[in-house]
Image (cartoon, rainbow, N blue to C red):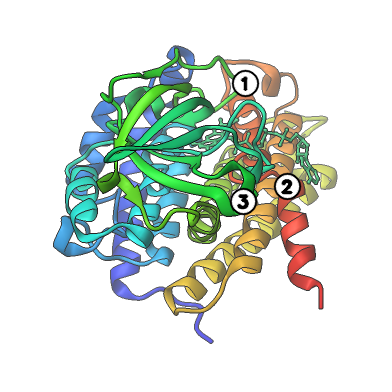
């Protein structure tokens, strides 16, 4: 077993850290206040090869693995979890095409992503989030393709997306076996995107509803076979959850940075906060949870890169990193005292940004369900 990154991994990690420090972190507070994604950061990240890294070189990507994606993601999200999420979440739309797309679909749509296009993964509906099989968006067979009707909610980057990977029911009577995925261009007649949803944190990453009113989708844009949508979504989550765990790792690292700096200079009762064991122990616990979350994320990614199943490892990594991030952000606010509650300091944003880690990409409860199911004999 090796606990060392290779030279290429160290280089890409250093590049991502530098970019995060110089380009993301300085924009974080303003992007949060404006609830707007700074598109110039996306353009710079594309130019530097810091996004869409897992796309094959033949399609304009770099053919890097999941571990490299985790390293880059942690670094970007250390600068700002909102901007980092918007930058990295394209992977959710590209993975289904990588897994199930035919050559023409890959060339056209992954090619566009490699050029800098944003795309969205549209699964969740107002009446079905955790209950993936309960989606109601309907894809009805018509000559030459399908007509989609229904609606999605909480779709990351929807307002910026050039196309969507949409999950719909082709045969509602078959339950989860009646789900199919489609590539749906954003300019398809009948498709509308709502206003960005107002939310607690990660405000720089826009999320919106998407509505389908008899949207025609040709057969050529169906991903895989009819009925393969549920399995495809689950495969995507195995591949994306190590990255989402890295969202949490980046946030915990930033909590460490901020809390340690503050606790080292702020004085109370004749010594720095770090001089008080109650505070120092919090930082020690934060360091332990940071390392544990990081190693779980690395393991889940490593297994994927080495062709091994990673369902339980990906769920453990996502669950642990999300819960540890929420804990670390809560402790950071506490260490900052009153200033932790002030919008003048970064702690309150870390706290707001952390919460959704326990909700999206499968809630913490759903991760525990998956882990428990994998334990069953
Ligand atoms: C900022 C943000 C971005 C998002 N981005 C996307 C995106 O890009 N694409 C997309 O498709 N979706 C996206 N989502 C949706 C997200 O994945 C869902 O919100 C999430 O899966 C939870 O679904 P829900 O909101 O319907 O909650 P519900 O499923 O209604 O859950 C409510 C509560 O009940 C619990 N619960 C539900 N079922 C069970 C069960 N069986 N066992 C135990 N507890 C249970 C949940 O854990 C939760 O605590 C995003 C959400 C947010 C907030």
With 16 as the anchor, is 226 left or right in this view?
Answer: right
Give the residue drawn at x 65%, y 34%.
128
Question: What distance separates the C-alpha of mark 3 from that of mark 2?
Answer: 22 Å
Q: Give the image quadrant in which the ligand numbered 1 is located.
A: top right
Q: Position of residue 345 (x, y in %)?
A: 58, 22
Front label number (1 vs 2): 2
Q: Residue furthest front?
A: 143
With 237 as the anchor, is 16 left or right in this view?
Answer: left
Give the residue drawn at x 54%, y 45%.
171
Q: Quick check: can you spot residue 284?
A: no
Q: Residues within 10 Å of mark 1 (few under 14, many from 20)?
A: few
Q: Earlier in the sequence, mark 3 or mark 1?
A: 3
Question: Disc 1 on helix, strand or loop?
Answer: loop
Disc 1 designates what residue?
200
Q: Is residue 180 above or below residue 63?
A: above
Q: Position of residue 114 (x, y in %)?
A: 21, 48
């Amino acid at each position: 077993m090796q606990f060392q990154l290779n030279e290429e991994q160290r280089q890409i990690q250093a590049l991502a850290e530098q970019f995060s420090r110089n380009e993301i972190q300085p924009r974080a507070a303003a992007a949060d206040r404006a609830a707007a994604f700074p598109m110039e950061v996306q353009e710079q990240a594309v130019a530097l090869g810091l996004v869409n890294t897992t796309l094959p070189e033949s399609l304009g990507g770099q053919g890097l693995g999941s571990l490299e994606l985790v390293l880059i993601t942690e670094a970007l999200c250390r600068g700002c979890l909102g901007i980092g999420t918007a930058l990295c979440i394209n992977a959710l739309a590209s993975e289904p095409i990588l897994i199930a797309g035919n050559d023409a679909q890959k060339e056209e749509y992954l090619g566009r992503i490699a050029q800098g296009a944003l795309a969205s993964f549209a699964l969740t509906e107002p009446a079905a989030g955790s209950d993936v099989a309960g989606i109601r968006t309907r894809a009805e067979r018509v000559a030459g393709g399908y007509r989609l009707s229904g609606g999605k909610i909480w779709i990351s980057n929807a307002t910026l997306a050039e196309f969507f990977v949409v999950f719909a029911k082709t045969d509602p009577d078959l339950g989860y076996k009646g789900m199919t995925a489609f590539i749906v261009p954003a300019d398809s007649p009948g498709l509308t995107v709502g206003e960005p949803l107002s939310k607690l944190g990660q405000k720089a990453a826009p999320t919106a509803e998407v509505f389908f009113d008899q949207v025609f989708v040709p057969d050529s844009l169906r991903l895989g076979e009819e009925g393969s949508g549920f399995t495809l979504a689950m495969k995507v989550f195995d591949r994306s959850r190590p990255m989402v765990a890295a969202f949490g790792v980046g946030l915990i690292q930033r909590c460490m940075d901020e809390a340690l700096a503050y606790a080292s200079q702020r004085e109370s009762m004749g010594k720095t906060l770090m001089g008080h064991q109650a505070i120092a122990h919090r930082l020690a616990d934060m360091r332990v949870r940071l390392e544990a979350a990081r190693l779980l994320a690395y393991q889940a990614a490593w297994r994927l890169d080495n062709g091994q199943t990673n369902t339980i490892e990906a769920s453990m990594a996502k669950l642990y990193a999300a819960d540890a991030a929420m804990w670390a952000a809560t402790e950071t606010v506490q260490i900052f005292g009153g200033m932790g509650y002030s919008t003048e300091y970064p702690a309150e944003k870390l706290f707001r940004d952390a919460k959704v880690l326990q909700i999206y990409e499968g809630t913490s409860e759903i991760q525990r369900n998956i882990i428990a199911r994998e334990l069953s004999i």
